[in-house]
Amino acid sequence: MSTQPCSKHLSDWKLDAKYWIENTLKQLNYKRVDELIIVEDWFLGDVWRIPTEKGNVYFKATASLPLFSNEAGVCNLLAHIFKDKVPDVLAIDKDRRWQLTSDFGEPLDEDVDLTVWNDAYQIWGEAQSLSVEHVNKLRQSGCQSRSIENLSTQLIWHFNQPKIAAILNDKNIVFDNLLSKLEIAVHKLKEYSLPDCLVHGDLHEGNMARTAESYLFFDWSDACITHPFMDGNFIYQFSETSLKRRLIKNYLSNWRHYLPESELQRAWETAEPVCYAHHTLSYASIVLNATDGNEDDVDDFTESFTRYLSCLTNSIRHKK
């Protein structure tokens, strides 16, 4: 990821952010030892690195988009609930969606094998299961509620927006009775009565870091309260192997106090198209609201939108 020194010619909000950072670090008794470094600067938010005598501190500002949670508020709460599983939050400005966190090391490599996924995903499942008792606090912190019941309605609305409709026409995407079948899948999934809980929303190796004793999860802009298996999007796409089956079995063990293993497995299989629909909606919303994004970024999100829509279509067609 490219980095660059923070320019003195900053926009108004970035100047305000710089003053907030300097004042907050003083209050925390952190002394800056070098210039701010821009790590990320795009329409979804900014990440800056601030070298201090106590190590690097990271500033993050998250965009306010329809399906984005208030990441600063969510992280601040999670730092208290799951202290060893999220970055250490030093300070937040919830109204402006700003936060300062301690350095937490490097994310996992993108080519990490399934044995690492197995460990990390099981730990994530433990956190999800524990989060059930905190859903009201999470909502109050700024975490979005995204019930699976609303997926079809929300997808219809997005598909009918001119910007999204143009993409669908360009790709010659035909739905047939896709959304009616999705509603059937949602209804079947709800019959298993698993509780809504914390979902990361973008759980991949680039948003996980290994610690001395466990794994740490970060980048919470897509966080929401919904069905737990909506974080299965990458797992569903892995090739069918014994490692994948063991990974799923270990993850599902976190929910055995709700259902026996055989029913959990059926619920997991039922959830696949619903999970793809959740992520199709996430990317449709980003594409629709990417007014300040450069062409390459928008193209990437458009590709992700159409890929998940294809996964949704294929999984629906193969369901009995």
Image (cartoon, grey):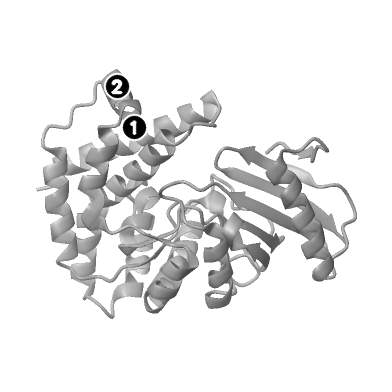
Is residue 23 left or right of 317 when viewed as pictured? right
Q: Looking at the picture, which amino acid does disc 1 mark?
A: Thr
Say what secondary structure mark 2 lies in. loop
Q: Position of residue 51 (x, y in %)?
A: 83, 54
Mark 2 = which residue? 171
Instruction: Give neighbour class at mark 2: few <14, some 14-19, many 20+ (Cα, 10 Å).
Output: few
Disc with the residue nearer the chain's start (1 vs 2) = 2
Q: Is residue 97 visible?
A: no
Q: Position of residue 71 (x, y in %)?
A: 54, 58
Asked if the residue under mark 2 is in contact with the one under mark 1, i.e. CB atoms within 8 Å, the reply is yes
Relative to residue 6, is residue 215 depicted above or below?
Answer: below
Q: Looking at the picture, which amino acid does disc 2 mark?
A: Lys
Q: Quadrant of the N terminus?
A: top right
Q: Nearer the viewer, residue 39 or 251?
A: 39
Say what secondary structure mark 1 lies in. helix
Is residue 55 left or right of 148 when viewed as pictured? right
Mark 1 = which residue? 306
Q: Position of residue 144 (x, y in %)?
A: 40, 59
Q: Is residue 226 visible?
A: yes
Is residue 164 left or right of 58 when viewed as pictured? left
**Residue depicted at x 31% and y 74%:** 255
